[in-house]
Image (spheres, helix red, strand yellow):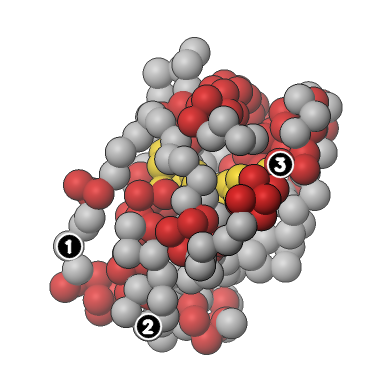
C-alpha cells in the first residue's frame, strides 16, 4: 500500500500558501528530520510538470447521485436500494479538518436516524500521519460541541475513487492533489473514467459562510479549530440535505 504513495524520493513540494499560517519556513526543516518514507504523498513532482490542471472538470454546489452503478456490475434492485451512500472527506494530513468533517457529518446522520444509509470516512493527501488519531486540539474542540472524532489517519488510495460516491475536499490544494493522483492512478488500474466528478469543495455547501475553503488550522491557535467547526457544521447540514434531495431512495 505504502508503495503506492512513494512516488517522490524527495520531500513533496507542499504548498501552504493557502494557509493563513504559512509553513514555508517551518516545514522544510521539519521534513529534513524525518526518514524519506515519511514524505510519501500523492504528489508526483515529475508528472506534475507535464500534467494539466483539470480545473475545468469540477462542478460545485450540488451532489451527484449515487454513482456506484457506474463502477460496479448491474445488480438487483434490492441491492441497489440498500447500498449505503458513501462520502469521503479529504484534507492534507487527515488529522484536523477531514476527521472533524467525518465527525460532524456522522453526528448529523445519526441524529436523523440515517446511520445505516451512509458510509462515511476521511483520508489525507499525504501519508505522514498515517495510523495517528486526530490532533488533540481538533478532538477537544469537537468534543466541546458534543462531537466525537474517532478516525485514524490514512492516505487517500486509488480504490477511494471506486468506493465513494462523493469526495469532499477542504481546500483547492487538496483538490489539485487528489485530482493529480487520480490522473495517474487511472492508467494503472480500472477506475471510473468520470470519478473526478465526485470531487467537490466542502465550502461549496456552506450557506451561512462566504469562505470558499476550510482553512488549515494546524499551525494556528484555538480560533482556527473553532472556525473549522463553524464551516463544517454549516456545510454538513446542506450537504446532507442535497444528498437526500438527489437520492430519493435514501
Ligand atoms: P489537516 O491539517 O490537513 O487539516 O489534517 C494538517 C495536519 C498536518 C499538517 C498540516 C496540516 N502537517 O504539516 O503535518
Residue 8, quarter of picture: bottom left
Which of the two residues, 23 or 122, is positioned nearer the viewer here?
A: 122
Between the residue at mark 2 and the residue at mark 1, the CA separation in whole angstroms equals 18 Å
Between the residue at mark 2 and the residue at mark 3, the CA separation in whole angstroms equals 31 Å
For label 3, the SS is: helix
Would you name the residue on which mark 3 appears?
117
Q: Which circle's residue, 3 or 1, is located before the other in the chain?
A: 1
Would you name the residue on which mark 2 appears?
188
Asked if residue 133 is positioned above or below residue 117 in the image, the reply reads below
Q: Which circle's residue, 2 or 3, is located before the other in the chain?
A: 3
Q: Is residue 24 left or right of residue 123?
A: left
Does the residue at mark 3 contact the one at mark 1 (Cβ under 8 Å)?
no
Does the residue at mark 2 contact the one at mark 3 (Cβ under 8 Å)?
no
Single out the mark in the foreground, 3 or 1.
3
Which of the two residues, 37 or 102, is positioned nearer the viewer here?
A: 102
Q: Is residue 132 left or right of residue 87?
A: right
Residue 98, how many percent across, how many down?
60, 46
Task: Tell me the quadrant of the picture where the C terminus can be found.
Answer: top right
Amino acid at each position: 500500500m505504502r508503495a503506492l504513495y512513494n512516488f517522490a524520493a524527495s520531500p513533496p513540494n507542499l504548498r501552504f500558501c493557502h494557509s493563513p499560517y504559512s509553513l514555508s519556513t517551518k516545514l522544510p526543516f521539519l521534513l529534513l528530520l524525518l526518514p524519506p518514507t515519511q514524505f510519501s504523498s500523492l504528489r508526483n513532482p515529475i508528472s506534475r510538470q507535464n500534467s494539466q490542471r483539470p480545473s475545468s472538470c469540477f462542478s460545485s454546489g450540488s451532489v451527484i447521485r449515487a454513482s456506484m452503478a457506474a463502477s460496479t456490475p448491474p445488480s438487483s434492485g434490492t441491492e441497489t436500494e440498500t447500498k449505503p451512500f458513501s462520502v469521503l472527506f479529504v484534507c492534507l494530513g487527515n488529522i484536523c479538518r477531514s476527521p472533524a468533517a467525518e465527525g460532524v457529518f456522522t453526528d448529523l446522520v445519526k441524529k436523523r436516524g440515517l446511520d445505516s444509509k451512509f458510509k462515511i470516512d476521511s483520508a489525507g493527501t499525504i501519508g505522514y500521519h498515517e495510523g495517528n488519531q486526530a490532533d488533540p486540539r481538533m478532538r477537544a474542540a469537537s468534543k466541546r460541541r458534543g462531537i466525537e472524532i474517532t478516525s485514524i489517519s490514512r492516505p487517500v488510495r486509488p480504490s477511494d475513487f471506486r468506493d465513494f460516491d462523493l469526495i469532499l475536499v477542504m481546500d483547492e490544494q487538496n483538490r489539485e492533489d487528489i485530482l493529480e493522483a487520480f490522473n495517474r492512478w487511472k492508467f494503472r488500474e480500472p477506475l471510473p473514467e468520470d470519478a473526478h466528478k465526485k470531487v467537490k469543495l466542502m465550502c461549496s455547501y456552506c450557506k451561512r459562510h462566504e469562505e470558499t475553503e476550510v482553512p488549515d488550522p494546524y499551525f494556528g491557535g484555538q480560533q482556527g479549530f473553532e472556525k473549522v467547526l463553524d464551516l463544517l457544521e454549516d456545510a454538513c447540514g446542506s450537504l446532507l440535505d442535497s444528498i437526500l434531495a438527489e437520492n430519493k431512495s435514501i
